[in-house]
Amino acid sequence: MNRRSLLQLGGMAALGFALEGCAPRTSAKPQLAPLRPAIHLPLVNASWDRVIRTTIGLRPHRPSGFVLKADKLDDKTLIHNFGHGGAGMSLSWGTASMAADLALAQPARRAAVLGSGVAGLTAAHELQRRGFAVTIYAATVPPDTTSNMSLAGFTPTSGLVQFSSRTPEWEAQFREAVLIAYRRLQLLAGPKYGISWIMNYAPTDNEQAGRGSNVLLPESVQGAREILQPGEHPFPMKYCIARPEMRIEPSIYLDALMADFLLWGGRVVIRTFDTPRDVAALDEPVVVNCTGLGAKALFSDAELVPLKGMLVVMVPQPEVTYSTSGGARAPVTPDAGFVHMMPRTDGIVLGGTSQRDVWTLDVDDAERKRVVEAHIELFAAMKSGQA
């Protein structure tokens, strides 16, 4: 081997290469994949003095999942569409479309929708698309609905069902609803409806957390996940799961849905219903029940319970265009839930509260402190890591 060849071999060896014939064959050690360039994210300015409001919402949860079925109330067709837990903003177009299809069995084309949250508004619009004249009957309208208190992203399994209570029939309904809703929300993306795609980052010390899949979701809506390795992300945990996420801004979205409903000739009547007899007295031959938690008393659904959610909102930061899930350093108990952050035009929204069968709309100071301080700690550690 001449001097030039020796120099070339030395240079290649320094870069981690080997030349066959010039080195003995040995069992090679596994090579670590080269680090990708680290991502740099604008920091959330998390502090108590930037908190501008705290909101409470009671999600309608049924351990066996939402109800979507046709029934009879005297001579009326009564279609139930309620109990979506924390997945109402995600699933509503799917269950609304399926509920409207059930209504087609009734030859008359006049329908009443009970409730003006996201389930009611989407059901009303799907009925209109099938030729129905629709009246919404509701005690409140946006921005004073539970749907307005959502975080909200495309999370079709959030607070939805107790896994041990699932049935094959319900799962078939769920999967159909997911596919319809996922497609419809994509088509509505843009400023008019307040729907956009952002990246979600879930910091974790457990690499396997990013390799699993949701057993309920169809493969086509699982989304591509990337596990960022140490040094590739700015979070204080070892790994970070990155995936694209659909963001829905509730105030923009619900106002746009209401505007569409009225533009199509819809009518809104403010009223409440105390008993099924009150519902039976309506003029419309088709009634779609989207009363959410109200169905517990109105239609005697003993299974329906609230999942109390609380959001703490800080001053908006337009430069923050990513969301986070998890990241709290303190041990998290099943009752405590976890934390997540969603940036919106109306503020940086911090959440992570889900209290089963709690009916009060009072602020839980301990939960509020947990959620805010977990995010203060997360983003302070991020700042230190990026310094």
Image: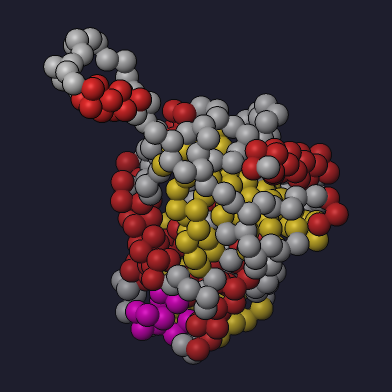
Residue appearing at x 41%, y 81% in the figure = 128
In the rendered view of the protein, which quadrant contains the N terminus? top left
Residue 34 placement: quadrant: top left
Q: Nearer the viewer, residue 300 or 254?
A: 254
Say if 269 sits above or below 90 in the image. Answer: below
In the rendered view of the protein, which quadrant contains the C terminus? top right
The spot of residue 254 in percent (x, y) is 57, 72
Q: Is residue 233 magenta?
A: no
Say if 105 sits above or below 337 in the image. Answer: below
The spot of residue 21 in percent (x, y) is 14, 17
Say if 211 sits above or below 198 in the image. Answer: above
Residue most toward the right?
A: 49
Residue appearing at x 70%, y 39% in the figure = 384
Q: Is residue 127 magenta?
A: yes
**Colour logic:** secondary structure
The spot of residue 265 in percent (x, y) is 49, 89
Q: Is residue 313 left or right of residue 85?
A: right
In this rendering, does residue 80 appear at all? no
Q: Nearer the viewer, residue 154 or 124?
A: 154
Q: Is residue 346 left or right of residue 212?
A: right
Residue appearing at x 45%, y 77% in the figure = 125
The spot of residue 224 in percent (x, y) is 37, 47
Residue appearing at x 32%, y 73% in the figure = 104
Q: Is residue 286 left or right of residue 60?
A: left
Counting the numbered discs, the total is 0
Residue most toward the front?
A: 3
Residue 136 placement: quadrant: bottom right
In this rendering, does residue 68 appear at all? yes
Q: Nearer the viewer, residue 164 or 151?
A: 151
In the image, the segment drawn in magenta is 125-134
